[in-house]
Amino acid sequence: MLPFFAVLSYFFNHYFLSAILFIITLLWGHARVKHLQRTKLLAEFKIPANIWAAFKQRHPNISSSSYPCIEEGFKDYLAIHMQHRNSYAMPSYSVDALFHLLILLILIMVQIQVQTHHVIVAAAVAVISTLLQLIFKT
């Protein structure tokens, strides 16, 4: 029977680097899969009609035909933030307005302690919680 230190020395000399590389590869693969899942969820995400109704009420000058472009710009902004974790300027006034509307709805939710019959605010809560999970979940 080999002494413990001889077995340990044999392991470190022959298998340690392989074990470390295997663990790093597993961790990288897990992070990559999680990132791809978040990216897929973001691509499939649609802003609810209730949010667009509140947006139209606050910004009647913005045409409803531009909503898909605004949504794509918002999702692109979030995707860039998820990828690089830096501060970036909003791509347009409309995207910034949508983002501020979502922030405002969160503040309203906090102030009035939302219940389920507040449809617009409840939709905003669902949107924001999904987006925050996509962006900040590691």
Image (spheres, rainbow, N blue to C red):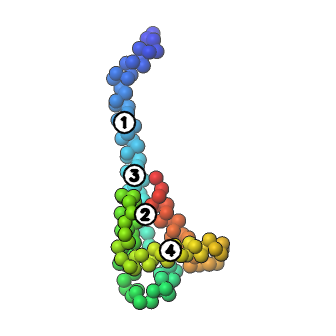
| Residue 21 visible in this rendered orientation of the protein | yes
Q: Which mark is residue 102?
A: 4
- Residue 95 location, x and y as percent? 40, 76
Q: Residue at x 47, y 58 (%)?
A: 136
Question: 101 and 34: which one is in front?
Answer: 101
Task: Name the residue type under label 4.
Answer: Leu
Task: Name the residue type under label 1.
Answer: Phe
At numbered mark 1, what does the secondary structure look like: helix, strand or loop? helix
Instruction: Measure how far apart labels 3 and 1 are at the Cα level.
Output: 16 Å
- Whether residues under marks 4 and 3 lie with C-beta atoms below 8 angstroms apart, the answer is no
Residue ID for mark 3 = 33
Q: Which mark is residue 22?
A: 1
At numbered mark 4, what does the secondary structure look like: helix, strand or loop? helix
Quarter of the figure with the N terminus: top left
Task: Name the residue type under label 3.
Answer: Val
Instruction: Measure how far apart labels 2 and 1 are at the Cα level.
Output: 29 Å
The mark nearer the N terminus, 2 or 4, is 2
Residue 35 sits above or below residue 2 on the image: below
Crowdedness near tag 4: few (<14), some (14–19) or many (≥20) residues, C-alpha within 10 Å: many
Task: Name the residue type under label 2.
Answer: Leu
Of all residues, the one furthest to the top in this rendering is: 1
Q: Is residue 128 left or right of residue 89?
A: right
- Whether residues under marks 3 and 1 lie with C-beta atoms below 8 angstroms apart, the answer is no
Residue ID for mark 2 = 41
Instruction: Measure how far apart labels 4 and 3 are at the Cα level.
Output: 28 Å
